[in-house]
Structure formats: C-alpha cells, structure tokens
Amino acid sequence: MKSQPPTPAERYRRRRLYLRSGQVIMLTGVTVLIVHWLAHLEAFGPSQPEGWIDLAAGYPMGMVLLIAGAIIASKQPS
C-alpha cells in the first residue's frame, strides 16, 4: 500500500515545527555564549571557568548549538 503525499497543511505544520525547534536550539546556543562571556568578565564572581569547561561547554558548545539550530530551522519538509 502506497502512502499518501502530505497535504499542504501537514507540510506547513511540519515546516513550522522545524523552524521553531531550530530557533529554540539557537536561542539556547546564544544563552550559552552570553553566560560564558559574562563568566569571563567575572560577572558572577572573581573566579574564571576551569579549562575543561572552556573547551567543552563554553564557546565551542554555543557555536555547535547555533549551527545545529540553523540547520534544523532551514530544513524543508519532505
């Protein structure tokens, strides 16, 4: 049995789901970047983030989240 192609309404809903999911992921990435930047400015106290946090959860993770969110947000429904 062949599956029916999605209706325009279903494609629109799926596109909106991809778009909003990607935007939430990008917002999370921006939040990670801002918090990490503020930590380097010592806004949360005089201590600096540890080295492994810099490598794992700092700028690289924020950028990965931004890129992944952009990819998901730009995905076209099939």
Image (spheres, rainbow, N blue to C red):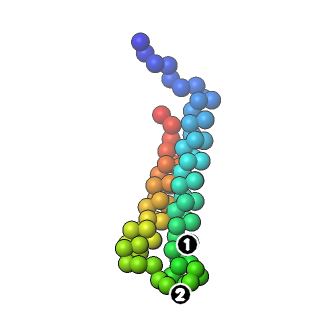
Q: Kindly indicate whether the residue at mark 2 contacts the one at mark 1 (C-beta within 8 angstroms).
A: no
Instruction: Give the amino acid type for the residue marked by disc 2 in the picture.
Output: Pro
**Residue 58: image location, x then y, percent:** 45, 71
- Residue drawn 57% across the image and 66% down it: 31
Helix, strand or loop at mark 1: helix
Helix, strand or loop at mark 2: loop
The furthest residue to the bottom: 46
Instruction: Give the amino acid type for the residue marked by disc 1 in the picture.
Output: Val
> What's the mark number on residue 46?
2
Residue 35 versus residue 18 in the image, above or below: below
- Residue drawn 56% across the image and 72% down it: 34
Check disc 2: other Cα within 10 Å, few if <14, some if 14-19, many if 20+: few
- In the rendered image, which residue does mark 1 sit on? 35
Lower position in the chain sequence, tag 1 or tag 2: 1
Residue 74 versus residue 40 in the image, above or below: above
- Residue drawn 53% across the image and 79% down it: 39
* Quadrant containing the N terminus in the rendered view: top left
**Residue 45: image location, x then y, percent:** 56, 84
Asked whether 3 or 35 is in front, the reply is: 35
Asked whether 19 or 41 is in front, the reply is: 41
Residue 5 versus residue 49 in the image, above or below: above
The furthest residue to the top: 1
**Residue 7: image location, x then y, percent:** 58, 25
